[in-house]
Amino acid sequence: MTSPIEVCWRGTEDYATSFDAMRAYTDARGPHAPDQLWIVQHPPVYTLGLAGDPAHLLVADTGIPLVKVDRGGQITYHGPGQVLIYLLVDLRRRKLGVREMVRLIEQAVIDTLGAYNLDVERRAGAPGIYVSPGGPAAAHAGAKIAALGLKIRNGCSYHGVSLNVAMDLRPFDWINPCGYAGLQTIDMATLGVAARWDEVAARLAQQLGRHLEQHTASAHAAPSTHTADAANAAA
């Protein structure tokens, strides 16, 4: 049996501190270590994935540090007003494959934004969540509102998902977000949702926990899905 998922509120934290702590927890965890969701926001920082191309940073002197990390995907931006939830999950114990994990995270974001009457969707071949065509947000159709990136090591995940709540979006203009030139990035505030950061963070954590537990409950009778020790999902 798996233990309950622990939710850890880490407040505003320097990116390097979170990054080092995620890797340390993953390296040290044993077979009975609890799965955890870390809720955090960061001071402004760009992160570049394992095989990322630095050319996707379009402005040389932004004043924002660039950190190379070991997740999948290209470049993205983290900053105040964005919910970050890092998922430290034993995928093997939960019989959870990497693609299933990505879809679970995406569905949790879709369900969270649906609670605020925002119509969003997946996009084939481009992990993350995007504004759907039609409706009151039609002017921003195709804009990206949430990004994800994972690293799987020894069958356990770290890194996670970011959801833009109420941000200064200008730093996204200085990159090709997630490697896509011209991709618009949006936040909930621009779409007309006035929601507190902590409220959205709690709702997203609840949805992530619910989907993880539902999968675990249904998967114990199903064949196990193996995971690879690789950076498996793109931001």
Image (cartoon, rainbow, N blue to C red):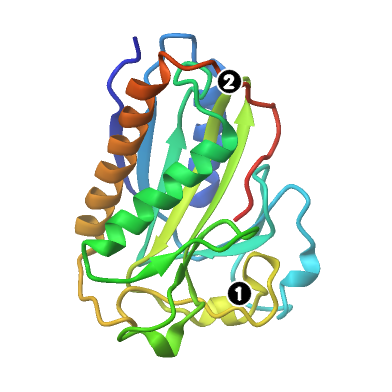
Seen at 72% across and 79% down, the residue is: 58
* The one of 215 and 46 positioned closer to us in this rendering: 215
Q: Residue at x 59, y 82 (%)?
A: 173
Which residue occupies 30% across, 50% down? Answer: 204
Which circle marks residue 63 in the picture? 1
- Residue 191: percent from left, percent from top: 32, 81
Q: Residues within 10 Å of mark 1 (few under 14, many from 20)?
A: few
Quadrant of the drawing holding the N terminus: top left
Q: Amino acid at mark 1?
A: Gly
Cα–Cα gap, marks 1 and 2: 32 Å
Left or right side of 44 for 47: right
Write down the residue under mark 2. Answer: 27
Q: Position of residue 25 (x, y in %)?
A: 49, 25
Amino acid type, residue under disc 2 in the picture: Asp
Instruction: From the viewer's perspective, tell me whether residue 99 is left or right of residue 34.
Output: right
Question: SS class of the residue under badge 1?
Answer: loop
Q: Dividing the image into 4 quarters, which one contains the C terminus?
A: bottom right
